[in-house]
Image: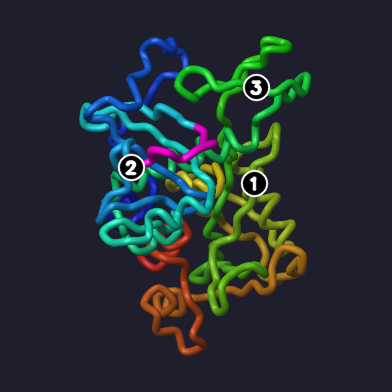
Amino acid sequence: MTDPRDTLGFVRNRLDRHSSEQPEEAVPAFDAPDARLVLICGDRIVLRGSTALIAPAEAAGLDGGTRIFLGHRDGQPVFAAAAPAEAAERFAEAPVRTLDLRSIATESAVEAEELGLLAVAKSMLDWHARHGFCAKCGTATVAKAGGFRRECPGCDAHHFPRVDPVVIMLVRRGDTCLLGRGPHFKPGMFSCLAGFLEPGETIEDAVRREVFEETRIRVGAVTYRTSQPWPFPSSLMLGCAAEALDAAIVTDPNELEDARWFDRDAVAAMLDGTHPEGIQAPPPMAIAHYLMRAFVAGET
């Protein structure tokens, strides 16, 4: 089996991250000659050719955006900034264009290590957009530490970016595995089951709970496989393999449209795009695709 970093999206990143404890005076100038910028207009990222790292001057005149110092990449300071969705119209003439992050990932529109940096930028800007007020007293907060912290002038509380852990699991029973499709999936696609980790819960127990809630299948042994940042808006996918103790599937219609046991040949056909029913697997950049390939290879 290949290294998951060879196929998974958002996992490669050579950004030297900016510490949240670094003083404000250590943040480089936004207009430094070697500075680079990730500019997100609404939900679309500005691309110049095959890179999303543009000169800050290209964002001149855009108003109302949050600005974050992400860190250094190859010695260059890198910033992220948000602009209104309508600003995308300004970047519609080749070689400049805008594209949403999912499309950038599935189309390999930028190099793999830059894709990881875009995940940081998007998650951070989403966090700022959703946390403008203090959760303790309700006062409007201000960005500090280059954007890696928000401070409340009312009660002095400090707020830091959060990551939401999600378990995603390939459930195996003999030579078959359990795959399902949610109501929001594109037609014909089946994937691994997944769900958010809850407070006070281990990864193993979250796998068992989510599988049982969605299919009434009890799970025994759980093994961690790999992880993947998922910036929609700010999750960390924890990929696991699990052993089923039951066979009968009873789906929760609020969670799944369908769930089935598939043998290795069927999963291989899904991955290759040759399944006789037209059933598809998630794209290679998704951790579910990696887990399904591991199952076909007998590695789960």
Label 1 vs 2, first from the N-terminus: 2
Dot 3 corresponds to which residue? Answer: 141
Between the C-alphas of marks 3 and 2, the distance is: 28 Å
Q: Which percent across, then down, holds residue 169?
A: 55, 55
Label 3 vs 2, first from the N-terminus: 2
Residue 138: in magenta span: no
Q: Which of 258 and 298 lies nearest the eye of the viewer?
A: 258
Dot 1 corresponds to which residue? Answer: 196
Residue 69 higher or lower than 52, as above or below: above
Task: Tell me the element at label 1.
Answer: strand
Dot 2 corresponds to which residue? Answer: 58
Give amino acid for label 1.
Phe
Task: Tell me the element at label 3.
Answer: loop
Residue that appears at 35% across and 58% down? 97
Q: Which percent across, then down, holds residue 196?
A: 64, 46
Residue that appears at 64% across and 51% down? 195
Label 3 vs 1, first from the N-terminus: 3
- Marks 3, 2: nearer the viewer: 2
Task: Tell me the element at label 2.
Answer: helix
Q: Which percent across, then down, holds residue 74?
A: 21, 31
Q: Which residues are magenta?
A: 58-66
Residue 268 higher or lower than 163, as above or below: below
Residue situated furthest front in the rendering: 61
